[in-house]
Amino acid sequence: MSANLEPQGELGGQLLRVLLERQCLLWADSRADLNAGRVRPLAAGPARHGALHWRPIGGGVVRLGWQDDDGTPLDAVLATEPAYYVADGTMGEGQGIQITAEDLQAIFAPL
């Protein structure tokens, strides 16, 4: 049985805001890292505008991922209201990022 550990929707956005204010958020890059206790604290970051972009990863291969308006890659965008991003050990509000769990499922379901 697998549990979804990501906050979602309006309640998830409220939870992230409170936890950021209290400096109580930790991040793991993968479930394996989480299980091994390899986590790091997240600091509050500035609000960023972002969108999905195809990013080159070498050898003519591209990967769909998030980046902000200046091209900085975002590690993750959470389907909360408002959306929150994670990048370089920070978390902040993703202004202008409109994404729902259903949107993500529609994007990645065909893969």
Image: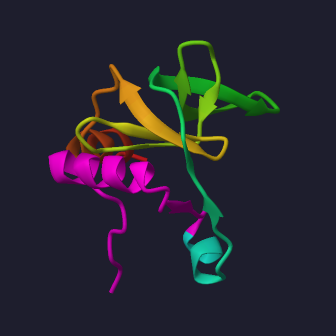
Q: Can residue 31 be seen in this view?
A: yes
Residue found 51% across the figure and 27% down from its top:
46
Quarter of the picture containing the N terminus is bottom left
Whether residue 47 is in magenta: the answer is no
Q: Which of 76 and 61 is in front in this view?
A: 76
Q: Can residue 29 be seen in this view?
A: no
Where residue 2 appears, as percent x and y from the top left, is 35, 80
Whether residue 2 is in magenta: the answer is yes
Residue found 17% across the figure and 45% down from its top:
10
Where residue 84 appears, as percent x and y from the top left, is 39, 39
Q: Nearer the viewer, residue 27 or 108?
A: 27
Where residue 99 appears, as percent x and y from the top left, is 28, 34
Q: Nearer the viewer, residue 39 or 22?
A: 22
Residue furthest bottom as drawn? 1
Q: Is residue 44 above or below residue 93?
A: below
Residue furthest left as drawn? 10
Q: Give the range drawn in magenta.
A: 1-30
Direction from residue 10 to residue 87 in the image, left or right: right
Direction from residue 10 to residue 89 in the image, left or right: right
Residue found 61% across the figure and 13% down from its top:
70
Direction from residue 34 to residue 7 in the image, left or right: left
Q: Is residue 16 above or below residue 74?
A: below
Residue found 57% across the figure and 25% down from its top:
54
| Residue 36 occupies quadrant | bottom right
Residue furthest top as drawn? 70
Where residue 97 appears, as percent x and y from the top left, is 34, 25
> How many numbered discs, if any?
0
